[in-house]
Image (cartoon, rainbow, N blue to C red):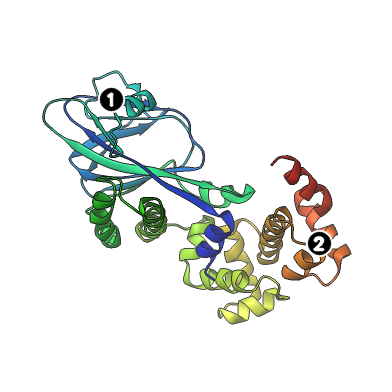
Amino acid sequence: MDPLSDVLSLLKVDSVLSARFEGCGSWAMRFPAYCHIKFGAVLEGSFWLWCEGSEVPSKFERGDFYLLTNGLPYCTASDLTKEPKDGRQIFDAYKGTDGVVRYGEGLDKVVVTGGRFTFDNDSSYLLIKQLPPLVRIPATSPCSTPLKAILDLLADETETIRPGYAISATSIANIVLVHTLRAHLAATSLTTGWFGAIKDKQIGTALSLMHGDIAKRWTVNDLATSIGLSRTVFTQRFKKFVGFSPLDYLLRWRMTVAGTELKNGTSLSKVAESVGYSSDTAFNSAFKRITGESPGRYRSKKEASH
């Protein structure tokens, strides 16, 4: 499994294609803080969007996609001179039986569809911390071709509520997330960070090897040889991107996977074996070293919080 698919699979993405907004004339709205990631796509017209604390609004045109990732309140507007009103109240008051929010009067119609991604896992930071507060994929970007194909599907699916909407909308939203992240990776010059590591041909291959078989007893020499680098150069380049040595990264990912399995009720022995430990004692020691608590205490805390 490639690293991005592995992380998204572990995070158990809950995708919701939540609303279609059709605004006319002059309007401005403010939305409250949110959990994890918000996304949107412009189906028609244009509008402005900015995160709270940012002094520079970004203009979005038809065919543009975006992700909001820092959880802070944000604003949208057709007219930057207008004082933003409560977006949630507007959506509640103007949402029709067909699921479409129609607001405002006049010309200059803008149609936007959007939703959210939340993650049922403590490791959401693995993805979110690697992204800027606002990821924008313009329709004019060479990397946006797959998203253009999704735009018509989004427009059709959000036009009204039809049988199978919940399943279809969730599937479309997941496709939007993957292709937006792909476009961001392709369009951005990344020389550090986890996404930069994925993008780098050799370090990305090493990550794929580790994620593909986390239980294997990998050595630095094995990994370095597999991608055609010396042990020293590989270790230096890996740490430059990821911030950890290869085996330290592998250990942390193993414990991340182990934490998810423990929360799901898998027995301690099976968890230990699945992440490469033949001894429960060795696994307990490694888990406590990374998380600060024993596997048993970790599981108990998670059970108590649900």
The residue that label 2 is drawn on is 268
Tell me if residue 223 comes above or below residue 61 in the rendering: below
Marks 1 & 2, CB-CB < 8 Å contact = no
User: Image point 86% across, 65% down: which residue?
Assistant: 280
The residue that label 1 is drawn on is 28
Q: Quadrant of residue 229?
A: bottom right
Q: Quadrant of the C terminus?
A: top right
Residue 44: tell me if it is visible: yes
For badge 1, the amino acid type reads Ala
Q: Which type of secondary structure does the marked residue at label 2 adopt?
A: helix
Marks 1 and 2, how far apart at CA: 53 Å
Q: Quadrant of residue 96?
A: top left
Earlier along the polypeptide chain: callout 1 or callout 2? 1
Tell me if residue 132 comes above or below residue 151 in the rendering: above
Q: 5 left or right of 43? A: right
Mark on residue 75?
A: none
